[in-house]
């Protein structure tokens, strides 16, 4: 039997994909056995009428080992 846990990560990137990859990269620094990332919400940062960056609010799920 296995147990999973989710943590929330906020990350930013030039694209939605880059922001999601940054969330994974940062989570991987302290969490092992990541199973998936669920992007709960995203936002675009706008300056002078143009999108400058994207931010994702994600949930990273990983397996807890005994």
Image (spheres, rainbow, N blue to C red):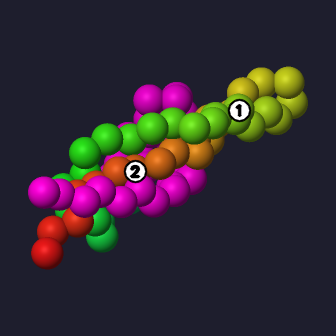
Q: Nearer the viewer, residue 52 or 35?
A: 35
Instruction: Say which quarter of the image contains residue 48.
Output: top right
Pinpoint residue 57: horizontal percent, then vertical percent. Answer: 58, 45
> Which residue is located at x 28 percent, y 65 percent?
31
Residue at image mark 1: 44
30 versus 46 height, above or below: below
Gap between marks 1 and 2, in whole Å?
21 Å
Residue at image mark 2: 60
Q: Is residue 47 left or right of residue 34?
A: right
Looking at the rendered structure, the secondary structure element under dot 2 is strand
What is the total number of numbered labels drawn onto the structure image?
2
> Which residue is located at x 72 percent, y 27 percent?
51
The disc, 1 or 2, on the residue closer to the chain's N-terminal end is: 1
Q: Is residue 62 left or right of residue 6?
A: left
Q: Residue furthest bottom?
A: 66
Q: Is residue 39 left or right of residue 27?
A: right
Q: Is residue 8 magenta?
A: yes
27 versus 61 height, above or below: below
> Which residue is located at x 79 percent, y 33 percent?
46
Pinpoint residue 61: horizontal percent, then vertical percent. Answer: 35, 51
Q: Residue furthest front?
A: 1
Region of the chain picked out in magenta, as a range? 1-25
Q: Nearer the viewer, residue 42 or 45?
A: 42
Front position among marks 1 and 2? 2
């Amino acid at each position: 039997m296995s147990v999973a846990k989710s943590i929330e990560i906020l990350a930013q990137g030039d694209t939605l994909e880059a922001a999601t990859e940054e969330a994974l990269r940062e989570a991987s620094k302290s969490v092992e056995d990541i199973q998936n990332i669920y992007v709960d919400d995203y936002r675009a940062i706008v300056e002078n009428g143009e999108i400058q960056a994207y931010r994702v609010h994600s949930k990273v799920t990983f397996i807890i080992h005994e």
